[in-house]
């Protein structure tokens, strides 16, 4: 969707300029658009009839540059993808969720420290975004809605910072990872090494 949209916006446009624009947006970080895949994607979209090659030029010893435009089929596809992303909720895959599901595999001290470190990294990112929101760089060189996206990302990060610190506190307090009565139940032996030592009964 990102590549179709940029070709539509900038056409006629070289693949080099599409790549440069996406990198200037840092789209590899938030849209999963990898710089090395952009030229391949342009060729594939052309094969599928969503883009068309307008011209191929070569200046001196430089590699040939192909200019692209979007086709009517590509326009339809772009609008379908765009509205699908606007109107449907898509939960992004989060590798941290996979790691957190194995929380008991880490010593408590390390789990707590890792959460506080995550909070600090997020806090640094929020600081950068808040500074950018008040900078001439953002206000003078970017569309207004780019600032609105920064607000969304920083607000999300603030919520996660608070969560990381709250969970780290609970881990430090020794809160059990399992509900009462399940700590010694059959089927949870993999958690045993992280549980408090058994106490002998009266």
Image (cartoon, rainbow, N blue to C red):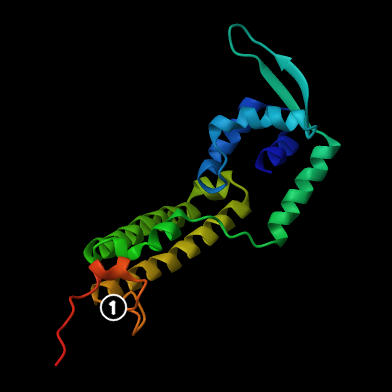
Outermost right residue: 72
**Does residue 11 show up?**
no
Dot 1: few (<14), some (14–19), or many (≥20) neighbours within 10 Å?
few
Q: Report the number of discs.
A: 1
Q: Secondary structure at mark 1?
A: loop
Give how far across and how far down residue 59 sits, in percent. Answer: 64, 10
Asked if residue 182 is positioned above or below residue 65 in the image, the reply reads below
Outermost bottom residue: 202
**Does residue 152 show up?**
yes
Q: Quadrant of the N terminus?
A: top right
Give how far across and how far down residue 118 sits, in percent. Answer: 35, 58
Q: Nearer the viewer, residue 7 or 39?
A: 39
Residue 20 relative to residue 13: left or right = left
Give how far across and how far down residue 179 sits, in percent. Answer: 36, 81
Residue depicted at x 39% and y 57%: 99
Q: Nearer the viewer, residue 159 or 90?
A: 90
Task: Quadrant for residue 98, please give it.
Answer: bottom left
Asked if residue 175 is positioned above or below residue 23 in the image, the reply reads below
Residue depicted at x 20% and y 75%: 196
Residue 138 relative to residue 191: left or right = right
Residue 10 relative to residue 61: left or right = right
Residue depicted at x 50% and y 48%: 136
Q: Quadrant of the C terminus?
A: bottom left
Task: Quadrant for residue 161, please give it.
Answer: bottom left
Asked if residue 28 is positioned above or below residue 121 in the image, the reply reads above
User: Which residue bears the numbered disc 1?
Assistant: 175
Residue depicted at x 57% and y 56%: 149
């Amino acid at each position: 969707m990102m590549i179709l949209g940029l070709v539509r916006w900038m056409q006629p446009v070289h693949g080099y300029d599409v790549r440069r624009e996406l990198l200037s947006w840092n789209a590899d970080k938030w849209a999963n658009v990898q710089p090395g895949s952009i030229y391949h994607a342009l060729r594939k979209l052309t094969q599928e009839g969503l883009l068309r090659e307008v011209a191929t030029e070569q200046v001196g010893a430089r590699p040939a540059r192909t200019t692209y435009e979007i086709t009517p089929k590509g326009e339809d596809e772009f609008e379908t993808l765009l509205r699908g992303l606007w109107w449907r909720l898509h939960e992004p895959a989060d590798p941290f969720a996979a790691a957190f599901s194995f929380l008991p595999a880490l010593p408590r001290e390390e789990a707590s420290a890792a959460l506080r470190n995550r909070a600090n990294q997020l806090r640094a990112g929020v600081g950068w975004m808040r500074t950018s929101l008040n900078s001439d760089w953002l206000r003078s060189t970017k569309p207004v809605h780019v600032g609105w996206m920064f607000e969304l990302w920083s607000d999300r990060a603030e919520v996660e910072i608070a969560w990381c610190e709250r969970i780290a506190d609970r881990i430090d307090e020794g809160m059990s990872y399992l509900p009462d009565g399940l700590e010694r139940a059959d089927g949870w032996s993999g958690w045993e090494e992280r549980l408090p030592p058994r106490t002998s009964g009266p």
